[in-house]
Image (spheres, rainbow, N blue to C red):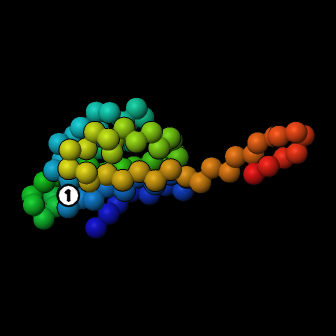
Amino acid sequence: MKRGTTSGQRVLIDIELCKGCGLCVEVCPRDLIQIEKHSLNTKGHHPARFHDPEDQCTSCTFCALMCPDIAITVYKPDEKKTHTVSGKRRK
């Protein structure tokens, strides 16, 4: 089971892989990840939970890079960039 989605970005935490080490909590610059103290996964660990009701996540990937169990996946939002070349707009 995976948790944690936002409208612009997606941070998915596989709660069955998570051991609740808290490294992701420490590196999140916006404090959007917490350890769930009131739930356990099937291995008996308190997993991390991503919570971003105000869409503050920048998809920096610090949490996924720090996770020793590879339990976190960060999906960056689609970026529609517009570039101007020779006076013509290109997408």
Q: Position of residue 72 (x, y in %)?
A: 31, 51
Q: Secondary structure at mark 1?
A: loop
Q: Position of residue 29 (x, y in %)?
A: 40, 32
At horizontal 20% and vertical 61% (from top left) the residue drawn is: 16
In the figure, 79 relative to 56: above or below? below
Residue 37 seen: no
At horizontal 36% and vertical 53% (from top left) the residue drawn is: 73
Residue 87 vs residue 62: left or right?
A: right
Q: In the image, what residue type sits under mark 1?
A: Leu
At horizontal 20% and vertical 57% (from top left) the residue drawn is: 17
The residue at which mark 1 appears reads as: 17
Mark 1 nearby-residue class (10 Å; few <14, some 14–19, many ≥20): some
Q: Can you say which quadrant of the picture contains the N terminus?
A: bottom left
Q: Residue furthest left?
A: 44
In the figure, 32 relative to 43: above or below? above
Q: Residue furthest bottom?
A: 1
Q: Position of residue 20 (x, y in %)?
A: 18, 47
Counting labels gives: 1
Residue 34 vs residue 76: left or right?
A: left
Residue 81 vs residue 43: left or right?
A: right
In the figure, 90 relative to 1: above or below? above
Q: Nearer the viewer, residue 59 or 50?
A: 59
Q: Nearer the viewer, residue 60 or 39?
A: 60
Q: Nearer the viewer, residue 28 or 81?
A: 81
Q: Position of residue 25 (x, y in %)?
A: 29, 38
At horizontal 36% and vertical 38% (from top left) the residue drawn is: 62
Residue 22 seen: yes
